[in-house]
């Protein structure tokens, strides 16, 4: 079993390298101009130029207490939510809903409501 884990790890690294260096183009991600304006008002000046906001994920910001706290708390909540809900968002949305499982429907509705609350209520409090 350990050989397979190592093979998956090596394959993931090689696949990521190939995808980044040979299968990617430099096209800027398209976001609605209103979304870009709102993100810039929240302090994300790199909005519309990359998938990951440099204000959170730039190497020099890794040791900023605020950014580290946001990422650490977010990671803990994701882990807790995955365990508590009995699966991840993709698992519930793709597998669970395709099998017409009521718990997956409830979980996906909860994920959606949680995302709306996060973006519309909590983000403005954190980044204002």
Image (spheres, rainbow, N blue to C red):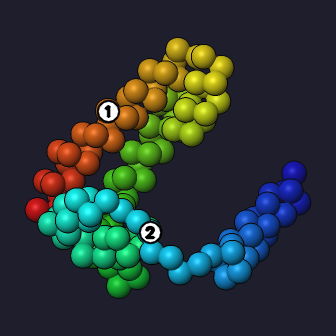
- In the displayed structure, would residue 120 be above or below residue 105? below
Q: Is residue 58 visible?
A: yes
Residue in front for this viewpoint, 26 or 15: 26
Give the residue at mark 2.
Answer: 29
Q: Note whether 35 is above or below 118 in the view shown.
A: below
Residue at image position (41%, 65%) is 30
Q: Which quadrant holds residue 9?
A: bottom right
Crowd band around label 1 with a 10 angstrom C-alpha radius: few (<14), some (14–19), many (20+): few
User: Which residue is tagged 1?
Assistant: 113
User: Residue 45 versus residue 16: which sits nearer the camera?
Assistant: 45
Gap in angstroms between the C-alphas marked 2 and 1: 25 Å
The structure residue drawn at horizontal position 14% and vertical position 66%, both measured from the top left corner, is 41
Element type where label 1 sits in the image: helix
- Label 2, residues with CA under 10 Å away: few <14, some 14-19, many ≥20: few
Residue 46 % position (x, y):
31, 76
Q: Nearer the viewer, residue 82 or 21?
A: 21
Helix or strand or loop: what does disc 2 sit on?
Answer: loop
Give the answer, above or below, for where 33 lies relative to 112: below
Percent x, y of residue 28: 45, 75
Q: Which residue does the image show at 34% across and 53% down from the upper left? A: 73
């Amino acid at each position: 079993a350990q050989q397979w884990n190592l093979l998956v790890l090596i394959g993931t690294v090689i696949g990521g390298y190939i995808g980044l260096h040979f299968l990617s183009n430099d096209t800027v991600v398209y976001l609605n101009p209103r979304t870009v304006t709102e993100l810039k008002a929240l302090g994300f000046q790199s909005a519309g130029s990359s998938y990951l906001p440099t204000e959170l994920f730039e190497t020099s910001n890794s040791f900023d207490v605020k950014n580290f706290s946001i990422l650490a708390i977010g990671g803990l909540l994701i882990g807790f939510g995955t365990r508590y809900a009995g699966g991840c968002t993709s698992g519930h949305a793709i597998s669970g809903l395709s099998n017409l499982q009521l718990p997956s429907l409830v979980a996906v509705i909860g994920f959606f409501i949680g995302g709306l609350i996060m973006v519309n209520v909590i983000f403005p409090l954190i980044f204002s």
